[in-house]
Image (cartoon, helix red, strand yellow):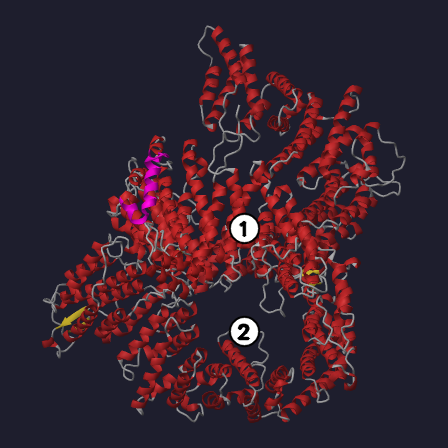
Amino acid sequence: MSLQKKEYLSCHELLKDRLAKLVLIDESDPKEESQILKNFRKLFRIKDVKQQIVCLKEICTKVQEVSRRNESDSELELSLEILVDIYLNCSPKHTVKRLLASTFQNFRDDLKTLVSTRMVHEVTVKVTAGVKDIRDGRKTVNMIYCLMENFPLGEHCLSQVFLPGLKYLSQALEEFLAAKRCELSPVEDNEMMHHCLACIQASSKLLQKCAGSLAGRESDEQRAIQSVSIAFLNNIVVILKSENFLLDCKTSGSMCLTLLLKLNLGSKATELILDVIFHENVKNKAEPPGWMLQTSLSRDELSQLSPTSCLCLWFGILAQLDVSDLLLHNEDNKSLLLDIMLDRILDMGSRSCDTTGKLQMAKTIHMWTTRALACVRSDCCDRVVTSRLSGPGHLLQKVLKFVWTIWEDSTDVIRFTAKDIFESLIKVHKATTDVEAPEDQFLLDLSRSLLSEVSWSSKGKYGTLRILAESLKVSTLLQYNPDLAQDILNNLKEQTVACYASDLYDKLSTEHLKELSQPDDRKQWQKIWVWPVLQCMMGNSTHQRTYVIEYILPKLLKTGKDTLGCMISSLCNSSQSVTDEQLGALIMCLRRARVMGLLDHAVSKSPEFLYGVVKTELVKQALSHTDDQARLDAFALLCENHKTSEPINQSEFRLLKYFIQWNMKNQSPSFRQHMVAHIKKLFLRYKESEGALCRKLNSKNRPPGLDTTLSSYKAFGSWLFQFLLHSLYPCSAFARRTTALSVLSLMVDLLSPANAGGYVIWEEWKGCHIQTLMECLTDTFEDNKTEAYKVLRSCFSQGLYLKRMINMSESELLDIGLTLAGSNRPQDCTTGAFLLRIVLLQPSIQDFFFSAQEILTKHLSPSALTQWGDLLNGGQGLREALQKLPLQPTESSGGTVLLLWILLFYLKDQLQVARTGLFIAAATKPMYPTLHCIRYILFDVNLKKLSKSEMLLWQPLMEDLLFCCLEISDIVSPVVQNSSPEGNVPEEAIKGVESIFASEGKTGTSEDKVSASEAERCVETVTLMPEYLIVCCWRNVKEVSLLLGQLTLEAPITTPHTSDVGLLTVQQNEVIGEYFKKQLMESIHRGAFELACAGFVKQCEMLWRCNIKTLHQLPKLWLDQVMADVKNDDENNKLCATRRSAGIPFFVQTLVSSEPHSTGRPCFKWSVKELLQLALMEDTVSGTPSNSKVHALNILRALYKDSRLGEVVTPFVADGLMAAILGFQSPFWAVRNSSTLLLSTMITRIFGVKRSKDESTMSKKNCQTGRQFFHQYPSLYPFLLDQLEVATRNISDTDQLHLHPGLYPVLMILGRLFQSPLEGADTSLNLAAFIPYVIRCSSSPVLKTRIMAARALQPLVQKGQLNSVMIQLLDMIPVEPKHAKHSHVHGALIQILNMLEVILTMADEIQSMESSVSKWKDKMWLITEKNPCYMTKQAAFEVTEKVLLVMEQLSSAQTNHVTKEIISSMTEALNEEFKAGIHNKQTLCCVPGFVEYLTVITKLDLQITLRDGKSSSAADIATKVQSLLGSELYEVRLVVLDVLASIFTAHKQCKEHSDPPATCPVTMTTMSSAAIDGVMSLLPYLLERALHQEQHFECQIKVFKVLDLHPLLESKDWKDLCVRESSLQVLKQCLCLIESSRREEVNAAIIRFSRWLVRDVLQHWGFQMDDCMETVDSWMAILRDSVGTEKITDLQLSVAMVIQHNALDLLRECQTTLGTKKMFEFWEMLTNLQQEDDPEVREVITMTLQLMGNARAVQPSLTLDYLVRSFIDVHAATKGANCLLTLISWIVSNESSSEGSERLFDKSEMNVFREDVLFYQIILKYCLALIQHGHFIASQTKHTNNSQHPEPDSPKESVASSFDQVLSQLHLVVNREENDMEMSITTLSLLESDVREVLDLIRTFMETKSPSSLTSDKGRPFMKTGAFQESLLDQYKCQVLGFIYKLLSDLTGLSKNDDQLPTCLNNLSNETENSTYPNCFVAS
């Protein structure tokens, strides 16, 4: 009986026999057939498991009825036999097995006896028959195990056959182990280990549940059990000794071993364990029984176990020994549990470096704490044991230290185990003490240290605090840290700790809520836990908001309905307007509440409210919110629902449409993914709710308004379908296309089949829609092609074929596809592949290919056509063979195989050209496009599901394809294997052309011959563009590699000596492997070997798992060969020693990373050991570098870098790091270079990817505690210490430069370690041992060494050592300069500086530092002229500054005196320096350290002057700053300007009610009043400096920035600023600077400053009008030039800020000065800037709109609409005609981007956000609004009063209908539903002259646009995509203008006889329709 999980029950022979007996019994009964027999017959006829279960239940019920009636004993017995047989033969976990077990258990006792008897008989038969084969053995093992799985009756049965069962299991284990010893594939080997695991687990369960005791058993039975035990114990020891066995198998085996010892030896088992396993002497030791001597359980055998196996063994002992046994003492009175095991486990764990060993150690420690807890709770535990197991006791302290060591481990499961250990430890402690937990000092101290001393970046902190929260009151934790909630939330910004932090937050908040008893406490709880969450949701951190919403908000909402009410009332106060931040947070809360069902039953207060709690208008605002997450949440609020069947109302549909149309082109991939996910939920709800409504159509209780509701569903579905298709217009943004296609694909999938009476999507499809999707196959993004293909495939499945829909035949499509499959443009080949895949989806495609001779003639050579004919009708007879195949249209591969043959012949033709010359192939027949098409088409077929007859037809194709691929590889190999392949044109390739020239004169009939002129043209093309050649070659390698790799993975293999038929043979697989080996070992071009690697990965994955012996041994064989080649340091081998060993690391990496993890990865371990041996090999002093060592280092780098290897490399990390560090000491550059790369990889592997940009500010995430680091890599401690000692031995020797190569990497590693306060002192791994050597580095003459040593010292010094180390460092500095060695002094100073930075972060340590920092006053000579060294002077000034900061926090009188003395000395030193004019001594710039020194003292002097300059006047301060700004050194000027900029920025932020930046040393609040006045008075000087004096570009940028930030410009008019020049003069000078500057950054700064000049220029316009006009014209020209897409963002941003700052002047009120035209130019600049893809620029435009009266900021897409609308609102009332003319001029003047260069890789500047069509549609919308409100005034009434308008020439109704016609024909994708046509004006006067001007503008433009030269080629959209889309775009622009022209003509009666324009439009329209089927964009 084949009974697998979830498969139906079938009837095997034994059951058939029993059923036949049942039939005989039934026939002997004269009554009708019994119900039981009927049900059994039915049971085996049913093919569905669920129905079979129902039938079985009926049978069991009938059996019980028969039993109660005492009828037909034979029938009853046979029925029970069948049921027992079914139960025993079912696979484990089968539903039927669980059902029958439950039924048997509930039978009456008499029936139970019958079942039990039958089961015992069946099991006895099975186990006594022995193990026949592996499969049968595993099946019986499963049967035995299942009988003990929650099935007491089964256990009872097994107890009766205990010994035979145990014997069988022993025999089965023996068989499985014997099978494993054979040569198996990795997959089979893994399967065998799982068989062993199942067998051991079944044995353990049998021993636990059914064994009882040997006492009272017969001696024969005892001997039998001992015999079985011998076999078992021997096999378990074998498993423990095996390196590559599953860890679970070893652990289970250890438990089984313990149980066997207990079974045989009883209480003496523990003594044996102490003696044999732990080598401990036992009191009254007895000799082991004789049978034990026959086992492998001896000291000698067990001493060979690995550390991991030992831990497994001890785990099993801990798990299975009784508590009393664990407390047994040895001869020295040591307890097994308390004294022996814990120390052994901790010691053994330190010796295992691999992840599995560490995990097993953690699990064993956890088991130890679990058993310790059991001991404490047991009766046999005395007071001594209890006291030893208390928290402060040394035992639990050891465990606690272990927890601190592993709680930050990189492996998740080890971290989780650490948390479990901590939890058990706390339980053990609580069980040993009588003190209440809230008063327990141990727990209080632990929680206090965790809260205050451990960083929140530590993941382990959260889990431990969570556990402590269960024991202590949360209020206690809040006393220690009142800001606990906020601290946790602040760490939600990091993804790595977000889940831990949220879990802790949830635990603390819920526990705290339980603690509160008073009703008023609830408000306090909400203040502590709810309000901080709301603040986070209103904050700026996107990550923090996301994690709060995802993890914390749902859990808070579950605490009660009042929590949601609290949130809503806090965020949505009816008396105040809702801010954007509050709105975003409110929507987030509502969304989560709705998903959780908290808003489902809310009754709406009024139509204005949505879901009864929020105004609809607020939701609409949220849908256009500037924040992406807020918009997504608002959209999700509409899409998601607790009940999917709840109808969608009109308001929701309206809001959904509003969101979708404005969010289609969001640039964030995350936003698009979330949006599509929400739309998927919407479609599911749409379908479900529509279905529920449709079901009510025919019901009696039909609700009112049902038809209206359903019509709204259909209207929305139809709108969305049309909208999505129309969004695929030419040049639409990638984001819009990808979103539209994704949503359309979902729509097609989820809304079909349609509900009866509901929306039917297939009724919408028209030819234009199909054409649009076909054109999407030309998209440059493959994902979009794929989505379009999916939708088209669905369409074809509904019968919407191309011939029927767009009149495109299969022959036309094949023609285009083959043309693209031979194109030399890389982007064409994917389009060709998709078109050919579309061909295969057409009906009767197989017959089409049989008759495709005409099309093939165009593309194939005559010889290829002949071969095609032979293939179909000749010897192979493919036509006949395909016609004989069974007709399965959905699965037949006939069409595919025919198309693949066509492509293969096409490829062979190209291959013939390539043989002639690679140049010609690269330029005309590059081969890789055809290979690409073959690859795409081939893998559309599931090759594994081909029938045997199909396989035989495919085999010749595979053989030819493989041959072609290998030949192509050989042809292109000379290029990709060239030592310099990029841009290389090999001479032999050029020489190959001469033969073509020579052959032209000869006679010949070869159709493949290329003319000499054609060949010469190709050579010229490729010589000028060498990328064509290299692209052709490496793309061919890419396609061949990916094709062969995928083929080996997908194609079935013909198994030798069997009847299995496949597509590839074993030999072909070996050939493919050799191809990959050659490519990876010999290719030099990175693209070639990387892509060969991608294919090789697929082959290796198949080979490792293949059951064919020859194949699964190949990877190991290749690995042996490559390692032999690497070791063989022979100059003649082809391995590339440069380019980081090229493809060799990829080859080895692929072989070992694809090795199955279940095997233990022996090949990986062997190869890494071999490579490390090579890498650690010493270099010879003379001779050449060892290529073997270089290769080894490069391969190791690849392996350590590979994320697929994960934790497997961890045991080898220490050796890898040693190899890298020692490699630095090599005398050969090649070795040192490879070692440098390896070191970088090792640092990343150990400490993680670098998070900080600057080396000096190392992120804590890139550091580890010293204990954790050296616990993980213990061998590195002595190595690093030794290296450091050797490197610093003669470091202070001044006679010669001493730079040890190993010093840099050692210091770099030490700089990434830090002390953890919880770890305690570990003498074996003490970081303090490194301190003397690091301090010694301070005397190095090498600057970099001193800097790195200072950085390394900082984390090594513990709290208690700070003072002593500081004194030691200060003592190193001499008191007199005559004894000073400046390099030594400098090294000590920068180490002191780093120590002071540490001290300043520790408030509790500062008081103890008085003695050390006070010594600094004796070293003040360092900052005086006595010290000639500028570097030490600089460091001394920096130290002085830090010392003063420390002393500020010391309050003693002695300290105050010292502080004054230091300040006085420093001020005096600074004054002397600047009096001497040091800031102008340019000649000193070449002196080392002078410039850095000068910048430091300048900054320090400025800070003192501005912050403490109370005695100086404002004039003195201004003079001093001016003198510094006049310095000859630009570095000094930059420092001064930086300080001024930071002061002004901080002042601006304070005015905006935000805190100044913490990094700002001086602010207006800390400055004296004189200093403020002095700084403010600098404005004229700064202006003079900027305009006339400053020449250095950085200073120019900075000085204009300072001017732009100057507070006086904001607070005063220009005339009040005491500036000599007028604003106009300054503006002129700014323009001159811009013209003379070549740097755009400088120009941007000047333009930004000019915003302060414009207003004043405009205000004084009348005095110098001509001069002003000329200057402003020049200024505007510069602004216009600066908004182009190709300009830098700073320039665009500056222009936007200029317009924003002067918005009212430039956009509304400057018509009297600049004039209307120029004012409108500023609006045009705004529209251009709004369409730029930089979000910062668009944000400024949004703020500008708010200044113009826009109520609130909206998302970017909508801002463009609001911008045009704002333009109309502001100016239409007074200048309506000008507005109309301007809008149309914007369309006319807008030029779409032209085609880029023809070169392959050159790309022009791109704007991915701008969409011309969208812009035209928005303009059109508002043009129509202006026309609709227009009132035409003919020329004779031109001068009449405007208030008296005559009636318009055409009635408003006809105009309105014209609008509707325009809107429907142009398919707007912008919002036109809500009051778009309502303007701020009621009527608009349109004079005849105005209208004529508009019409003339349109006509003039149309006359310049002659119809483009479109051909009647249907392939044009696919082959000339760019030109085709450009012509469509031009046509659309003409259509838009033409419609406006026609409307104006109809409205006014002008140009009625002018039919020129419509003719032009008709020509364009007709031409497009004739050339291709019209798509949605042009279809009318």
Q: Mark 1 falls on what kind of element?
A: helix
- Which residue bears the numbered disc 2? 1555
Q: Mark 2 falls on what kind of element?
A: loop
Name the amino acid type tagged 1.
Answer: Lys
Query: Is residue 1885 visible from the viewing direction of this image?
Result: yes
The residue lying toward the viewer, choosing from 723 and 1388, is 1388
Position in image of residue 946 (x %, y %): 43, 35
Decide: few, some or many residues near mark 1? Use Cα within 10 Å; few <14, some 14-19, many ≥20: some
Name the amino acid type tagged 2.
Answer: Asp
Q: Is residue 702 magenta?
A: no
Rendered image: mark on residue 1078: 1
Position in image of residue 1527 (x %, y %): 56, 89
Position in image of residue 290 (x %, y %): 84, 28
Tell me if 1119 is positioned left or right of 818 in this view: right
The residue lying toward the viewer, choosing from 414 and 1963, is 1963
Tell me if 634 is positioned left or right of 1910 in this view: right
Q: Which residues are magenta?
A: 854-879
- Cβ atoms under marks 2 and 1 closer than 8 Å: no
The quarter holding residue 1307 reads bottom right
Image: 425 above or below 1578 = above
Tell me if 1050 is positioned left or right of 1378 in this view: left
Position in image of residue 824 (x %, y %): 37, 57
Residue farthest to the right? 284
The residue lying toward the viewer, choosing from 978 and 1630, is 978
Image: 514 above or below 172 = below
The residue lying toward the viewer, choosing from 1923 and 1115, is 1115
